[in-house]
Amino acid sequence: MDKRHYPLPLDEQLALRRQAVDDVVSNPDWTLQECVRHLRKKMRLTSDEMAALAGVSSKTIQDIEQGRSAGTVQTMNRIFGMLGLKLAVVRVSCPR
């Protein structure tokens, strides 16, 4: 948990995580960059904390958030996987 904030009880931390996931899932038009940043900020994590949870470097998190890197599929799955999400390709119906 980000040290700039006061510690939250576990139930509040879980509620923040659920809300962060719901926000990302309900906004399919967000870029991966926006999703990663929203997840990190909503869960009140530093780049270092998110990186440690996802098993990637903090530079990778920063590069994705700042648009310097799009991240690989494997990296994005590590980041999203810590919350039970997975990067996927879905069929979208095309307007005629």
Image (cartoon, helix red, strand yellow):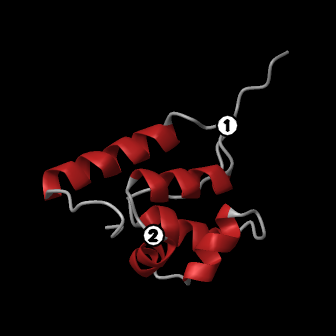
Farthest right residue? 96
Q: Badge 2 is on which residue? A: 46
The image quadrant where one finds the N terminus is: bottom left
| Coordinates of residue 74 in the picture (x, y in percent) | 60, 74
Regarding mark 2 in the picture, which secondary structure is present there? loop
Who's the residue at 39% across and 76% down the image?
53
Who's the residue at 51% across and 72% down the image?
47
| Coordinates of residue 32 in the picture (x, y in percent) | 65, 54
Q: Is residue 72 visible?
A: no
Tell me: 72 left or right of 6: right
Callout 1 crowding tier (Cα within 10 Å): few <14, some 14–19, many ≥20: few
Q: Quadrant of residue 70?
A: bottom right
Gap in angstroms between the C-alphas marked 2 and 1: 25 Å
Q: Badge 1 is on which residue? A: 29
Who's the residue at 25% across and 46% down the image?
15
Q: Amino acid at mark 1?
A: Asp
